[in-house]
Amino acid sequence: MSDDASASVLAARSLTLGYGSDPVVHGVDLEIGAGEFTVVVGPNGCGKSTLLKAFGRVNRPMSGQVMLHGRDLRTRRTKAVARELALLPQSPVVPEGVTVRSLVERGRFAHHTLLRQWSPDDERAIGEALDLTGTTDLAEVPVASLSGGQRQRAWVAMVLAQDTGVLLLDEPTTYLDIAHQYDLLQLFARLHRGGRTVVAVLHDLAQAARFATRLVMMDGGRVVADGTPQEVVTSELVGDVFGLACDVVPDPRTGTPLVIPHEEPVAG
Amino acid sequence: MSRQSTLPSRSRSAPPAPETEHRPPRGVMVLRLGRALALPIRRRSLVVGVLIAVVVLVCAAATLTLGNLGVPLSQLPSVLTGGGEATDRFVLSRLRGPRLIVAVGVGAALGIAGALFQSVTRNPLGSPDVIGLAAGAGSGAAVAALLLPGVLPVPVGALLGAGLAIGLVALSTGTGLRHPGRLIVAGIGVAAMAQAFTHFVVAVLARDEATSLATYLNGSLTARDWEHAAVIWGALALSLPVLVYLAGPIRLGEMGDEISETLGVPAKSTRTAAILMSVVLSAAAVSVAGPIAFVALTAPQIARRLSGAGGPSLVLSAAVGALLLVCADLVVQQVPVGEGLPVGIVTMGLGGIYLGHLLIREWRKGSL
């Protein structure tokens, strides 16, 4: 990894995070470079979502710092940060009676001032976000009445309308069927190719390995492996971290690592 | 890196699009003033707002013209411009005029206070009149007016009372103002204590004065003067800049702290400012008209349904609040059954039914 600070978009410096007095993440150092598609993986409770939220300025570090473009996040104004990074949390609350369009419009808040709350830019960004997520036809439908897959796409559209260089996604594919999962991942990959820096927390190692340019594996609140999918997804590491005996084979389509667990249903 | 046009590219690098290609969506107009001002206004909200304003005007005209002392409708324009008969001018400038202006201001203030608090607590029951804010302000006003006359101005007393009540509620929930269920239960307790205290003060000191009894116990608009009007409209004018600032952030705040922070809203300071404004406006309303029940509870809910935008609307809440109170006051002035009742009794009767409906609904939803 480069030590050049200008190349890193986000950086955790000896970051300790937690709720109440118990740390969940212990002294993590991690740099996210511009234009990377980083996927953070690890067992339940390893602190990956907590770390992502700290990157998104949603939870305050117990100690250490999060730097965005070399500046401490805590010293920045909420609105200024929201123009540079967007975070899609897990299962957000759908406000009653809100249509897809008005949800997506809310993504534009950080670009408004007290007196200028509409610009042609808003219209373009909202139109693009609806278009990219395939929700244009759902624009006037209340979010609460959508199916799980549609609803998740509406939330992604809101985050896209925010028009930020950095996208943080917390388990964006949970609760979706497999086709919708790949639809979304494909969209994130396109956004990444379009120049955005993407950091996602995912559960599925095969998906993570297929889409990430860089994998970060966490365990017990620490980063235990960091590198290309081939470097990180090995049978030794998966065995150590997840406690799952497995073989790792190349994905027949992409060549990326694929985990084949040893566990089999007991015959009889 | 060169980007292909088919790829989603960051907008900053996109060429500036001509304005004609990106018009506001259907049903939205943009209020513009040069390059400095561009505010989107939903057509439906505008229509609803104008309709409510018209109905308020009709009720206002009825308030001024009906009954024994009413100014004849044909005379109203000339009396309003300073002409007409002396009696009519007296009725307008001393009796019904200030009462009407106070009613509009108090209704608007209660509507806004309710909208702010309900939005912050994300619950229709988290309203100043349910959780003891108004009752606390009523106690404070009663103490200032009856116990310490001339020492403490009534609005200041109301403000202190409201602040004390909300402080007590926040303390007794153990979780501040976050958990709506606890907030409502604690609030009902604080409201009951505050009302008992007000009854005590009134019973000890003012048992001969029916009018002041009504004002401090139920809320009344009888015998209001221009000083009352100045207090409530002054409070509205002073809070206007903060309200304009808060209108957007509180809408986003309803999605929860995490989402609203990532969208650029400082969640905690927004909540603090909204509660503060709600306390100030409730206190101002109570200090001029007493603890008028349930306008703050119902007006924002009606406004929400009328606007259909899926969020709080401060402007429409104010308009509906004004309408409710002007109508209720017209009832107590002109309808034979209601005549002479304090206006707070009417709002309590109507709002109480709505409160019951809400309690049952929220209970079924499991949010209590």
Image (cartoon, coloured by chain):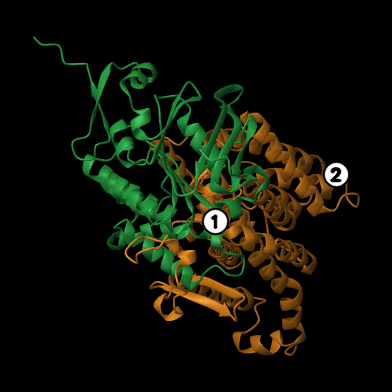
Chain colours: A green, B orange
Q: Quadrant of residue A57?
A: top right
Q: Chain of mark 2?
A: B
The residue where tag 1 is placed is A83
Q: Position of residue A84 (x, y in %)?
A: 54, 53
Q: Quadrant of residue B335?
A: bottom right
Q: Is residue B346 above or below residue B364?
A: below
Going by the numbered disc 1, the residue's amino acid type is Arg
Residue at the farthest left position = A268
Q: Chain of mark 1?
A: A
Q: Position of residue A28 (x, y in %)?
A: 56, 29
Secondary structure beneath dot 1 equals: loop
Instruction: Mark 2 vs mark 1: give the one in front.
Output: 1
Going by the numbered disc 2, the residue's amino acid type is Leu
Left or right for A205, reference B344: left
Q: Position of residue B229 (x, y in %)?
A: 74, 66
The residue where tag 2 is placed is B147
